[in-house]
Image: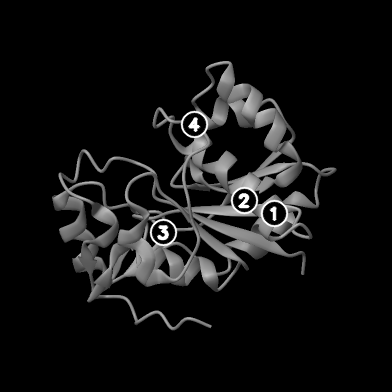
Amino acid sequence: MVRVAGVVLAGGLSRRMGSDKTLLELAGKPLIQHAIERLAAQCEPLAINANRDASRLARFGLPVIADATDDYAGPLAGVLAGLRWAQQAAPDAPFIMTAACDTPFFPDDLIIKFLEASEEVAYPAIVLAKSGGQVQPVFGLWPTVLAGDLAEALASGTRKVLQWAQQHSQRIVEVPMISLGGKQADPFFNANTPEQLAEAEALASCLAPFKPR
């Protein structure tokens, strides 16, 4: 399999949560740890994209990389930071895969689907996830050779992931709903608010414990 580096995107301000959501507990461990474990099952090496005090994330033993811009420019800034980090840390990896820090249930085999989709078109192609009829732009496979192009796009004011992605070859991977406690749930359910974190806790109680590979 093609080597893919992984980046957990945790560069936001957690405004809707009211506190640093990355370290809030879900099912007995920090919310971000769920994303780290699932991404680590698919990618190597791994890093965390975060913009505040990096020492708070030291417990996870991963490099912490800040946005390539200083204005909290959104996921694209984290993607660019990840691309530049991977070019140095894993020069033999033609892609990075990104995942959101607040999305604890995403599939641990998503990379296989991403790589298969990327082979449908010539490199470099961007691959994004989709569920419930909605594209999930934070979950993507990004060619490292597009780092320069993305830097130019950000410098010109581009902030929306799909706006930039649509300028390149791309594929969308449809991911089915998952069954939790007899109910259908979105695998990309994210905990942005205290209410959503409580809902995630209820969903997690219906899910078999995740066992990192």
State the residue in front, 170 or 6: 6
Q: Nearer the viewer, residue 195 or 66?
A: 66
Labels 3, 4: front one: 4
Q: Residue flagged by tag 1: what amino acid is it?
A: Gln
Closer to the chain start, of discs 3 and 2, is 2
Q: CA distance from mark 3 to mark 2?
A: 27 Å
Q: Residues within 10 Å of mark 3 (few under 14, many from 20)?
A: some
| Residue 198 screen position, x and y as percent | 15, 60
10 displayed left or right of 195 = right
Q: Residue at x 45, y 62 (%)?
A: 106
Secondary structure at numbered mark 1: helix
Which residue bears the numbered disc 3?
187
Q: Quadrant of residue 206?
A: bottom left
Find disc 1 in the rendering and name its residue.
88
- The answer, for residue 63, to whether it is visible in the render is yes
From the viewer's perspective, is 205 left or right of 2? Answer: left
Q: Are marks 1 and 2 in contact (CB under 8 Å)?
A: yes
Give residue 153's position: percent from left, percent from top. 62, 23
What residue does disc 4 label?
Answer: 69
53 or 146, which lies in front? 53
x and y percentages locating residue 168 in the rendered image: 72, 30
Lower sequence index among marks 1 and 3: 1
Lower position in the chain sequence, tag 3 or tag 4: 4
Colour convention of the picture: one colour
Which residue is labeled 2 in the image? 85
Q: Are marks 4 and 1 in contact (CB under 8 Å)?
A: no
How far apart, in angstroms, are the residues tagged by discs 4 and 2?
Answer: 14 Å
